[in-house]
Amino acid sequence: MKDKKRLLIQVSKKLLEQLSICLGTLLFFTFYFGITISDLAPAFTFGVFLLPVTMGMVNVFSFHLIPEYLFRQKYFWFALYTVYTLVISFFLIALSSFYGFIFINSLETMESGSMLGKNLYLIIIGVYIIVLLTSLFSAYRESYKIHLRNQELQYALVNGELQLKQDELSYLKMQIHPHFLFNTLNTIYGSAILKSNQTPELILKLSNLLDYILYQTKKSLVPLQDEVDHLKDYMELEKLRHGEKLKIKSTFPDQLSKQMIAPMLFLPLLENSFKHGKSHGKDSFVELRIEASESDINFFLKNSFEETDQNETLTSSGIGLQNIQKRLALLYPKAHNFTFEKVNGYFIVNLHIQTNQPKSS
């Protein structure tokens, strides 16, 4: 039922379009030929004789040659069929004009022949004006349709890319969470085995971090202050775990501006430094420094590491560094600088973010 209704609507629109062109063509012929004949009635009648060949040319050019050949870049066939159409139409216009003059002037009047020869070029020009105008309108309509289709395709492409980026970001966060939780739970497990009085405090710190991971990371941006607070919680966990064997030096801005940043960017980096900063037989060292302005954030991280771990550290750098690189490329394209290197037994990470740049999500 819906298909029949849709077909009926399409046919009605097509008929209305053809009827509009017919009426417009007759009006044009009436006034165009009425100038020379000085009588609108015979001019209208003469236009009726030219209407079939004119509508035929209009339909051939507007609804076939232009959309099927010109806009599909089949220029050779368009030019060839255009020549054929013009040649055939010339004879049909002459034939229609001849019978139109006979009908107007009567069968006995032979002056119509001389009038035909004298005014034929004006008649052809009049017909071709109609064809040209309708062809230009058809070309504009086709180009507008193509423009709309291109816009729809571009919109669909952009939406698809954004969805892919969002899916990839979600996947990267899912990778970060289990890895981070695994290490933190190991810390609490070790403390519980030793029946340490610090275990409740460890659990409280972990609770705060879980709240941050489960709820705050669902947001596209969080205050920089929140990220810093949870960096401090994580460092406290590591201090409680390692005690005097771990030396931590941290520097944060006295007053953080109202900066917003993508969540869980810094926490995996800090976690990675503790993972690779463990040393056997000597104290471990981690230094963290964060600087912030209205439009920039600078993150500096330095940790000691065993020389035997340097290949793993510099190539894989843990799940955290790999994911951070991917997330930064998605969230801050051309608005960040992320480097990490080994220098004199230390692993150094530098991250600079321009937060006033547009984000990808």
Image (cartoon, rainbow, N blue to C red):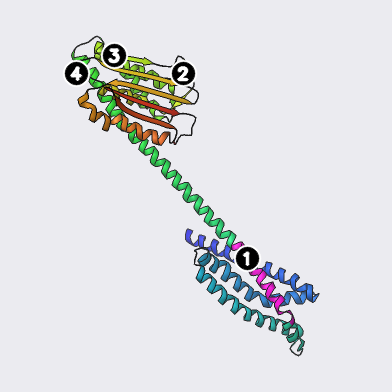
The three-letter amino acid code for the residue at tag 2 is Leu
Give the image location of residue 73, x and y in percent. Answer: 50, 64
Q: Choose the circle earlier in sequence order: 4 or 2.
A: 2
In the image, residue 58 sits, relative to residue 335, either above or below, namely below
Quarter assignment of residue 126: bottom right
Residue that carries the numbered disc 2 in the rendered image: 256
Labelled pair 4, 3 in contact (Cβ < 8 Å): no
SS for tag 2? loop
* Magenta-colored span: 118-138
Give the image location of residue 303, x and y in percent. Answer: 29, 20
Give the quarter of the figure containing the C terminus: top left
Q: Choose the circle earlier in sequence order: 3 or 1.
A: 1
Q: Choose the circle earlier in sequence order: 1 or 2.
A: 1
Q: CA distance from mark 3 to mark 1?
A: 83 Å
Q: Choose the circle earlier in sequence order: 4 or 3.
A: 3
Q: Kindly report which numbered mark, 3 or 2, lies closer to the viewer in this rendering.
A: 3
Residue projecting furthest to the bottom: 108
Q: CA distance from mark 4 to mark 3?
A: 14 Å
Q: CA distance from mark 1 to mark 2?
A: 66 Å
Q: Choose the circle earlier in sequence order: 3 or 2.
A: 3
The three-letter amino acid code for the residue at tag 3 is Lys
The three-letter amino acid code for the residue at tag 1 is Thr
Q: Report crowding for label 3: few under 14, some 14 to 19, many 20 or more residues within 10 A (C-alpha).
A: some
Q: Nearer the viewer, residue 21 or 249?
A: 249
Q: CA distance from mark 1 to mark 4?
A: 86 Å
Residue that carries the numbered disc 3 in the rendered image: 247
The three-letter amino acid code for the residue at tag 4 is His
Q: CA distance from mark 4 to mark 2?
A: 37 Å
